């Protein structure tokens, strides 16, 4: 069956003694097999409708908000793209389409199209000074 965009996997669903990894599917996921974190195997059974509100999550040294992208190392795969939303200290690997993904498959946000959010507006040249204009 695989995962679909928007699915959230929360390690606390079945493993309350873990680091509390939470990932969100940003793209792809048809070939998803598992995530290994803290020695636990997280599968489709760990999908939750929303992040569980529990304390005790342990962040990875990278923090949160980083993206693991299968296409970085495997361009012909299903294109699984996961964002680490919380926890992740014990993240070991992810498996999708028979490939193993690690932190080496992190994708920079700027390469995903977030580099230029607003185009620079061209400056207009005019003969008038930028001071006050109009009739008084």
Image (cartoon, rainbow, N blue to C red):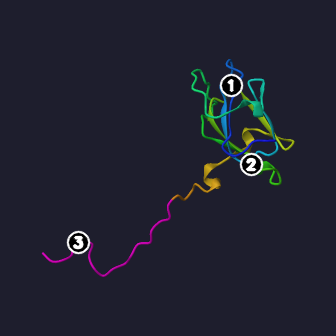
Count neighbours of disc 2 (C-alpha within 10 A) and say few if under 14, some if 14 to 19, many if 20 or more.
many
Label 1, secondary structure: give it.
helix
Q: Which residues are magenta?
A: 118-136
Residue identifier under label 3 = 131
Taking the magenta stretch, the answer to whether it contains residue 13 is: no
Disc assigned to residue 13: 1
Residue identifier under label 2 = 28
Lower position in the chain sequence, tag 2 or tag 3: 2
Vertical position of residue 80 compared to residue 56: above or below? below
* Quarter holding residue 92: top right
Nearer-the-camera pick, 2 or 27:
2
* Residue at (50% x, 61% y) in the render: 118
Quadrant placement of the N terminus: top right
Taking the magenta stretch, the answer to whether it contains residue 126 is: yes
* Residue at (57% x, 56% y) in the render: 115
Count neighbours of disc 1 (C-alpha within 10 A) and say few if under 14, some if 14 to 19, many if 20 or more.
some
Q: Is residue 133 left or right of residue 40?
A: left
Is the Cβ of the residue at disc 2 closer than 8 Å to that at disc 3? no
Is the Cβ of the residue at disc 2 closer than 8 Å to that at disc 1? no
Q: Position of residue 99 (x, y in %)?
A: 84, 42
Quadrant placement of the C terminus: bottom left
Lower position in the chain sequence, tag 3 or tag 1: 1
Label 2 and label 3: CA atoms lie apart by 54 Å
* Residue at (80% x, 54% y) in the render: 75
Vertical position of residue 76 compared to residue 98: above or below? below
Label 2, secondary structure: give it.
loop
């Amino acid at each position: 069956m695989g995962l679909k965009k928007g699915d959230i996997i929360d390690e606390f669903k079945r493993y309350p003694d873990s680091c509390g990894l939470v990932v969100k599917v940003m793209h792809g996921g048809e070939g998803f097999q598992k995530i290994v974190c803290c020695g636990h195997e997280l599968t489709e059974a760990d999908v939750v409708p929303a992040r569980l509100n529990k304390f005790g999550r342990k962040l990875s040294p990278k923090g949160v908000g980083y993206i693991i992208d299968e296409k970085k190392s495997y361009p012909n795969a299903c294109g699984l793209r996961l964002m680490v939303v919380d926890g992740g200290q014990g993240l070991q690997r992810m498996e999708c389409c028979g490939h193993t993904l690690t932190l080496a498959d992190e994708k920079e946000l700027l390469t995903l199209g977030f580099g230029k959010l607003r185009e620079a507006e061209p400056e207009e040249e005019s003969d008038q000074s930028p001071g006050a204009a109009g009739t008084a």
